Image (spheres, helix red, strand yellow):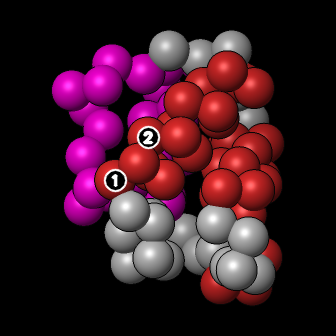
Amino acid sequence: MINETLVFETLRDTTLEVVPELTAEQFRADECLADLGCNSIDRADIITMAMDRLGVVVPIGEVHSGLKVRDLVGLFAKHS
């Protein structure tokens, strides 16, 4: 199982790459990517990039726009 801290950091880093106007301080576990200003294409890019970097495959049916970052972290860790 992948460490949840690593998953959080990877999601944060990929989000900041895709949406460079965000700061690391704005990326919090209690926020949804949509609430951070990520549109559907941004979210797909972030999830895909994070899966590639972590070597994890998360079924797309388990990912939806209402998930908070902490939920995504748990989902990635579960499928690692």
Q: Are marks 1 and 2 in contact (CB under 8 Å)?
A: yes
Circle 1: is it few (<14), some (14-19), or many (20+) Cα within 10 Å? few
What's under tag 1, amino acid-wise?
Answer: Ser
Quarter occupied by residue 18: bottom right
For numbered disc 1, what is the local secondary structure?
Answer: helix
Whether residue 74 is visible to the viewer of this picture, yes or no, is no
Residue ranking furthest to the front: 41
Residue ID at (33%, 19%): 59
Residue underneath mark 2: 44
- Residue range (magenta): 58-80
x and y percentages locating residue 55 in the rendered image? 68, 15
Q: Amino acid at mark 2?
A: Ala
Residue 33 in the figure: left or right of residue 16: left
> 73 above or below 52?
below
Left or right: residue 33 versus residue 4 is left
Residue 73 visible, this orientation: yes
Residue 59: in magenta span: yes
